[in-house]
Amino acid sequence: MSLRRPFALLAVALMLTACAAPGATTRPTGTPAAATPTAAAATPTAAAATPTAAATATAAATPTTAADACAGDLALKNPGRLTLSTDIPAFPPWWGGEASEQYPNEPDGGSEWTSADFSAEPYSMEGFEGATAYAIAEAMGFGADEVDWIANPVFELAFAPGEKPFDFHMAQISITPERAEAVTFTDPYFDSNQSVLALSSNEIRGIATLAQLKAYRLGAAANTTSFDLIENIIAPDVEPAVYPDNSAALLALQNDQIDGLVVDLSTAFFMRDAQLEDFDTPQPEGIIVGQFGPPAVPDQVGAVLELDNALVACVNQAIAQIKTDGTHAEILDMWINAGQEVIFLD
């Protein structure tokens, strides 16, 4: 997925003997334990498979709380603090708050997002990824006042090879084998279905089924799961258009060369709420016509760490904990499921 400039579920890999990377700082022993999980259980996903004997043995040796994986010294960029990162600007529904507002846990004088145009504010702890980031941090044993944020100005930099200034980065980044050669991904914290983006002026806005969608001019970026979906699942009556990237595809949508643009739902939110929002020239609103369930395969989104960073064991255990105790589901309902009204095209 390529959410910004041209922008899964419970596997726990624990590394109890992992050492801090050379040059990294460590979190002192005695970190406050994470809150005890409630009895609420996260909703299972289709990605869950029947455990094998080996998997069962591994799970039996895996601690059951984030506090176990996060006990002792952790490889951190700054001692006693968790350094997180996301893109700048940051947009709803992934991030919330007002960049111009001073939040209690925000540095005096504001953050890097304070002066960014039309940006949300990570220190607000709002939005799906914002709230999820702080829930993960809490499960790792960090309070809100122990979290620092670093702005990433170019989407691709987060998963480019090399040393990272952050402990982990969250910005709707899909887990792919190619990216995993350069960075380490956590277990997924979000599944993003494919969807159809259109302009409110186009009659495609009123469709509700795959059969109806076949009659329209559709397009997507080349070499993407989005274009594969058009060809293999939608199978439109009109030859689909293919573009070098999402920016070119979005321009074609704006120029009425296609009726609908197929992109993952995360990208559709961003295009609708940011890229199609022209603050100088009136134009039709962007709308998400609908999203696709099975047999379409969703993109899985994970947090990014420096390659082979041992901290991933602690972060994965924290993600598992907030899914098990119901926190993740509550955040998902609040920021993604509620108010979006994105129908499934059956």
Image (cartoon, rainbow, N blue to C red):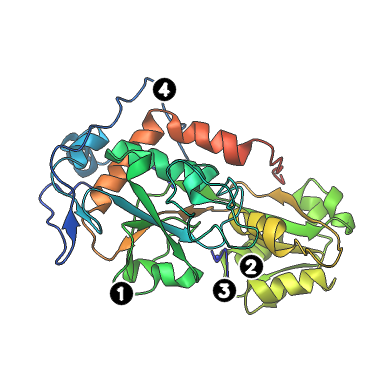
* Numbered circle sitting on residue 227: 2
Where disc 4 sits, the SS reads loop
* Numbered circle sitting on residue 162: 1
Q: Position of residue 286 (x, y in %)?
A: 78, 57
Residue type marked 3: Asn
- Mark 1 or mark 2: which is in front? 1
Q: State the residue position of label 4.
A: 40
- Per the model, the C-alpha gap separating discs 4 and 1 is 39 Å
- Per the model, the C-alpha gap separating discs 1 and 2 is 31 Å
- Per the model, the C-alpha gap separating discs 3 and 4 is 40 Å
Q: Counting residues from the N terminus, which is met first, the one under dot 3 or under dot 4?
A: 4
Q: Counting residues from the N terminus, which is met first, the one under dot 3 or under dot 1?
A: 1
Tag 3–tag 1 contact (CB < 8 Å): no
Point 36% across, 21% down: residue: 38
- Using residue 79 as the reference point, say whether residue 203 is left or right of it: right
Q: Position of residue 184 (x, y in %)?
A: 31, 61
* Numbered circle sitting on residue 223: 3
> Is residue 278 in view from this perspective?
yes
Classify 174 as above or below 241: above
Q: Counting residues from the N terminus, which is met first, the one under dot 4 or under dot 2?
A: 4
Q: Position of residue 100 (x, y in %)?
A: 59, 52
- Mark 4 or mark 1: which is in front? 1
Classify 144 as above or below 88: above
In the rendered image, the quadrant that contains the C terminus is top right
Point 19% across, 44% down: residue: 54
Point 32% across, 44% down: residue: 146
Question: Which residue reaches farthest front?
Answer: 109
